[in-house]
Image (cartoon, helix red, strand yellow):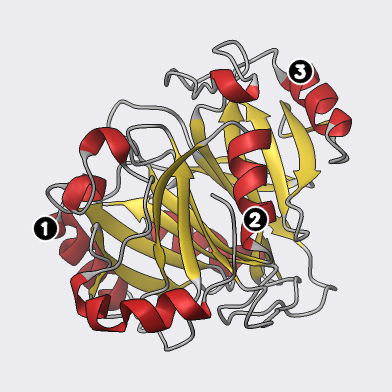
Amino acid sequence: MSFISGYHHLTLSTDGAQEDYDFYTKTLGLHSIKRTVLFDGTIPVYHLYYGAKSGDPSTIVTTFPFKKPGIYGKRGTNQSKIIQLSIPVGSADFWVDRLNARGIPATKTSRFGITRVALAHPCGIDHELVESPADTRTPITSDVNGVGPAHGIRGIYGAAVAVFDRTSMDDFLTIAMGMKKEADSDEGLMFSVPNNGGPSSMVEVLHQPNGPQGTWTLSGGTIHHLALNTVNEENQLKLKAHIEGLGFTDVSDQKDRNYFKSCYVRSPGGALFEIAWSVEGGWAKDEPADAIGSTLVFPPWFEDRREELIAGLEPANF
């Protein structure tokens, strides 16, 4: 039995809040489903969430725009490298044309025999829109931004991790995380994420032994973590115990993220993984269910700092 069912979300640290918001909503056609602030540390930074209108797990990309504090990292090896979102088969040409017309260079490419569109977030983080034949989720549409059901992003396909050592990452993903190796070639490794009858999602491992070590800190221009969905607390704690029992001791205690609860583990390939489950109420804990992502909200423990945090945030027109 697997303790994981697909992805929960993907999180990256970007640059400007406005360009980030415009990229995911106006260009990619995702919906704003939560606007809050970074819960860790003391620096006021937005935490922005995008995905399906209802905020379904496996569709969520979250970002920390770091332009105002001016904290930036280095992209490299031993680090998550590419954010991957699923699109309908046959829609790659639409996205190549749409992205290039909007000033975002995009090309059609292939890896592991799967067609994808290669592009970059305005801050430089690589993204891919992947034509996933196994994905049956309803596409995310945005009439106002011209993204219809034939082309809309379905949700998370996965992520690509660059590593110095393929073998240690292979062991971690299969033995610790319970993933299945689907491909092993000169293009890299591909592992399928366990999923309870839903869409197929992947972790891809790219062997890049000669690149510079990438940044692991929370810093602009880098991917921070890949969150897998344990569905409930029981699975999360059982998986945490399993990972620790194998000797992977770089595992955090449970963190309260208000809408979900998380534990983090640093993989031997450098990528930070999160194991998470959504709490009852989810995104609607502090906003109406039909209006999530429409206001700036704070967790209860930050209410006494509301004015200070708002004053420290980067101005943006959401």
Report x, y in % for residue 61: 50, 49
Measured Cα–Cα span from mark 1 to mark 3: 42 Å
Q: Amino acid type of disc 1?
A: Glu
Report x, y in % for residue 182: 55, 38
Label 2: state its secondary structure: helix
Q: Is residue 124 above or below residue 108?
A: below
Please report whichever mark, 3 or 2, sits nearer to the chain's N-terminal start. 2
Q: In the rendered view, does 249 fall on the left or right side of 218?
A: left
Label 1: state its secondary structure: helix
Measured Cα–Cα span from mark 1 to mark 2: 38 Å
Q: Nearer the viewer, residue 233 or 166?
A: 233
Q: Residue at x 56, y 78 (%)?
A: 218
Q: In the rendered view, does 177 fall on the left or right side of 214?
A: left
Q: Which mark is residue 150?
A: none
Report x, y in % for residue 169: 55, 64
Q: Which residue is mark 2?
A: 18
Location of residue 208 by image quarter: bottom right
Q: In the rendered view, does 314 fall on the left or right side of 272?
A: right
Q: Are marks 1 and 2 in contact (CB under 8 Å)?
A: no
Q: Which numbered mark, 1 or 3, is in the foreground of this view?
A: 3
Q: Amino acid type of disc 2?
A: Gln
Q: Which residue is mark 3?
A: 94
Q: Which residue is mark 1?
A: 234
Q: Is residue 240 above or below residue 130?
A: below
Q: Is residue 278 above or below residue 137?
A: below
Mark 2, other Cα within 10 Å: few <14 / some 14–19 / many ≥20: some
Q: Residue at x 70, y 12 (%)?
A: 90
